[in-house]
Amino acid sequence: GAGVSQSPRYKVAKRGQDVALRCDPISGHVSLFWYQQALGQGPEFLTYFQNEAQLDKSGLPSDRFFAERPEGSVSTLKIQRTQQEDSAVYLCASSLAAGVYEQYFGPGTRLTVT
Amino acid sequence: QQQVKQSPQSLIVQKGGISIINCAYENTAFDYFPWYQQFPGKGPALLIAIRPDVSEKKEGRFTISFNKSAKQFSLHIMDSQPGDSATYFCAASSQGGSEKLVFGKGTKLTVNP
């Protein structure tokens, strides 16, 4: 595809359910980032992959959040036992390589926890 | 600790006017400063970016001005159009880190026809 794609676009979960959010980066992009955007706020960093290696997970808010990128392409962000405060838009971005700063964002997944 | 401070929170300009959004940063290790444009329901789109070795960069109607000593940078939108109405985010990152972007809180721009 031409850009970063994310699925699902919208997800409603009951509190306590587990969710999995998918990101397909731009083909050939080595670096992949996940951000969380609360309503009316700027995106906040969650985690970073270079190929399949998770090099920075300092932004993950709790151990309920887990991300993986097993083959260095598609990535999944998993949230276990969702809480209401997890409601936000989850954005994925990719960049060509380390040292190439330009990050290109997908449309995001809007998660609502009821 | 807010590492990138953005102002104003909202801005209303008339069609054809100049829109100016300002950002200030604290971390002197930052070496890349992009601006993103976001429409409702969409992801942020990279608009223009600057490195600290230049003081100004222009692309079409969009200009970034950068003041390294003051740790400030700004976005100027010339001849603002109603289609420019969106939320704009400044951001910063450092090659020394994971190149994660640190965003400002955003400016909602409305351009009246």
Image (cartoon, coloured by chain):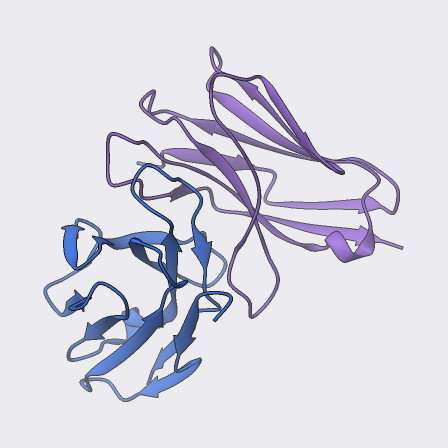
Chain colours: A blue, B purple
Residue B73: horizontal and vertical position, in percent? 55, 26
> Is A97 in front, or is B104?
A97
Q: Quadrant of the C terminus of chain B?
A: bottom right
Residue B53, given in percent of the width and then of the height, sits at 48, 16
Quadrant in which residue A47 is drawn: bottom left
Q: Quadrant of the N terminus of chain B?
A: top left
Q: Residue furthest left?
A: A63
Measuring from the top left, give residue A38's x and y in whole percent: 41, 62
Q: Nearer the viewer, residue B110 or B95?
A: B95
Q: Residue at x 47, y 25 (%)?
A: B51
Q: Farthest residue in the front direction?
A: A28
Residue at image coords 34%, 20%: B28
- The outermost residue toward the top is B69
Q: Residue at x 59, y 44 (%)?
A: B9
In the displayed structure, B46 sits above or below A62; it is above
Task: Please tell me in which quadrant of the rendered image residue A43 appears.
Answer: bottom left
